[in-house]
Image (tube, rainbow, N blue to C red):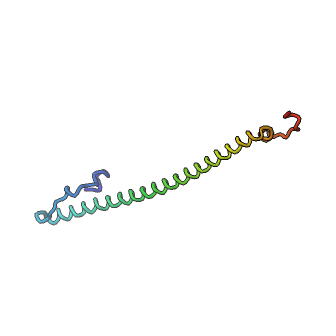
Amino acid sequence: MASLAPDTARFRPATDFPKEIRTIEPDQANALYVEMRDCLIFTNRSRAQLVRRNTEHKEKTLALRSHINTLQSLIEQLKAQKQNQIQEQERHPCSARRRNDGNERPAQYFV
């Protein structure tokens, strides 16, 4: 019986079954029909699982790509901010140093 076989044995090619049943006894033909039907049911379930997993994979891939794009955008913003800060420091070295220290000191310390 097909239901007792391991899962991989349930994927059977059409060549495993006879093309014609004229020479087969009715009981054998019924047994073959049941076996073919079991194989078809198993194959359809497996296909449905494959389609579902493929859909899940595509959705996860799209979500990850979106997340990557968001992170790349944030990286670009940070690069631009860093470049602006560097340019600001080059233009005004004293005020940038004060801002980076976090402590406001009297101007006499920077002379």
The residue sitting at 33% across, 61% down in the picture is 44
In this view, 78 is above or below 34: above
On screen, residue 85 versus residue 59, left or right, reads right
Quarter of the picture containing the N terminus is: bottom left
Residue located at (60% from left, 51% from top): 73
Q: Estimate the x, y position of residue 63 in percent, counting from the top left.
A: 52, 55
Foreground pick, 37 / 88:
88
Q: Is residue 36 left or right of residue 62?
A: left
Residue for point 85% across, 40% down:
104
Q: Hey, which residue is sitting farthest left in the picture?
A: 23
Residue 27 versus residue 44: which sits nearer the camera? 44
Q: Quadrant of residue 49?
A: bottom left
Q: Give percent across and percent down for residue 28.
A: 17, 62
Where does the image place residue 21, in percent across and percent down from the top left? 14, 64
Closer to us: 34 or 39: 39
Q: In which quadrant is the C terminus drawn?
A: top right
Judged from this view, the residue extending furthest toward the front is 91
Identify whether 36 is placed above or below 73. Answer: below
Find residue 96 and report its image quarter.
top right
